[in-house]
Image (spheres, rainbow, N blue to C red):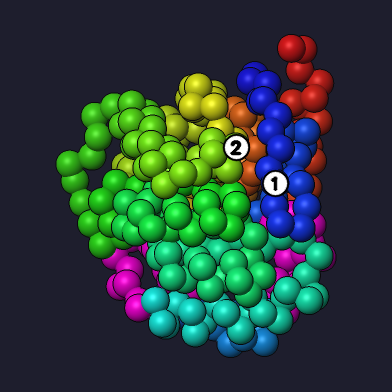
Amino acid sequence: MFHRKRFRLYLRSRTLILGERTLVMGVLNITPDSFSDGGAYLDSEAAVARALQLEQDGADIVDIGGESTRPGATPVTAGEELRRILPVIQVLRGRLRIAMSVDTRRAGVAEAALAAGAEILNDVSGLRLDPRLGEVARRARAPLVLMHMRGTPQTMQRGPFARDVVRGVMSGLREAVARAKRAGLAKSQLLLDPGIGFGKKHEQNFEILARLPEFARLGCPIVIGTSRKAFLGKAMAESGGASMPPGERLLGTAATVTASILGGAHIVRVHDVAEMVRVVRVADHILDATPP
C-alpha cells in the first residue's frame, strides 16, 4: 500500500488540497464522437444540465472537452472546439460551485476557456502539440495536467508499442515537465497523468496501475483516467468473447479506480460520478487505515 504525498493546488477561486482525500473529476464531452458518450451532450443546454448533475453527484471538478481524443478520432479546428465549449463554460461560471477544467491541446482554446471561467488546463499531448499552452498557463497561473500519449490520437494504437511501458511513460512525463518549466511554469502548478489507454497495449495499462507508486518519484500529483476504457472491456469479457461495450464497464472502472487510489492517485477522472464517489470513499477508508 502506498501513502501519497499531499499537495496544495492554487486556483483562481480556491485552493484544492490533494492527498487528504481523493478528488473526483467528472467528464463532460461536448463532442459527437467521443468513445463512450459522443453526442449525448453536444447541445449546450444538455451539457450545462450534465455539469450541474455531475456536481450534485459529488464531483470536485468538471472536465470539459470539445474535441474527441479517442483512438482514430478526427481533429477539429480550434474554432469548432471553442464553439462547442465556450457557451457552456460561460453559463456554468455563474452556476457551478466546483472548479472547471478544460480538456484541450491548443493554446488559443485554453486562453479563451480560462477567460470564460475555467481554472484548470488538461493537455493530453503534454505540451507536444502546442507548447504555447504552457505560456497561457503561466500567465493565468493555472494548474496544468500533463498527460502521456504515444503519438497522436490517429496513430497511438498502431504498433510497435514500448517494450518497457513504465520506463517509456516516465521518460515522456519528464520531458513534458521540462517543456512546462521552459515555459516558465512552477512545478507546483503541474499534475501528471500516465495516459491510460493512450498508446499502450491492453496489458500495459494494468502494468502502469500495478506500478503506479513509481510515478510518485516525479514529485507531482497524479491524475488517473481509466473510466469505461477499452482495456476494461477486453478484460471483463468472457474467454474468447467480444469486448464489453463502454456502458457495461462500470465494475471494471470501479476496480481500477480503487487500485489507482491505493497506488497513490490524487484525482480520478470518471464518467459515472455518483457511483465512483462511493467507490472513492471506500478506497480512501482502506488507505487511511493502512499503517504508514
Q: Position of residue 198 (x, y in %)?
A: 37, 49
- Please indicate whether residue 277 sits to the left or right of residue 142 in the image: right
Name the residue tied to disc 1.
10
**Which amino acid lies under the numbered mark 1 shown in the image of this protein?**
Tyr
Q: Pick out the residue farthest to the left.
A: 160
Task: For label 1, count other residues whose C-alpha is less than 10 Å away and answer few (under 14), some (14-19) or many (20+).
Answer: some
Residue 60 is covered by the magenta coloring:
yes
Q: Are marks 2 and 1 in contact (CB under 8 Å)?
A: yes
Task: For label 2, count other residues whose C-alpha is less than 10 Å away and answer few (under 14), some (14-19) or many (20+).
Answer: some
Name the residue tied to disc 2.
188
Q: Pick out the residue farthest to the top.
A: 292
Residue 278 is covered by the magenta coloring:
no
**Which amino acid lies under the numbered mark 2 shown in the image of this protein?**
Ser
Q: In this rendering, does residue 205 appear at all?
A: no
Q: Residue at left 73%, top 65%?
A: 54
Q: CA distance from mark 2 to mark 1?
A: 8 Å
Q: Residue at left 80%, top 25%?
A: 288
Residue 219, placed above or below residue 16:
above
Q: Position of residue 217 (x, y in %)?
A: 50, 22
Assign the N terminus to one quadrant of the image. Answer: top right
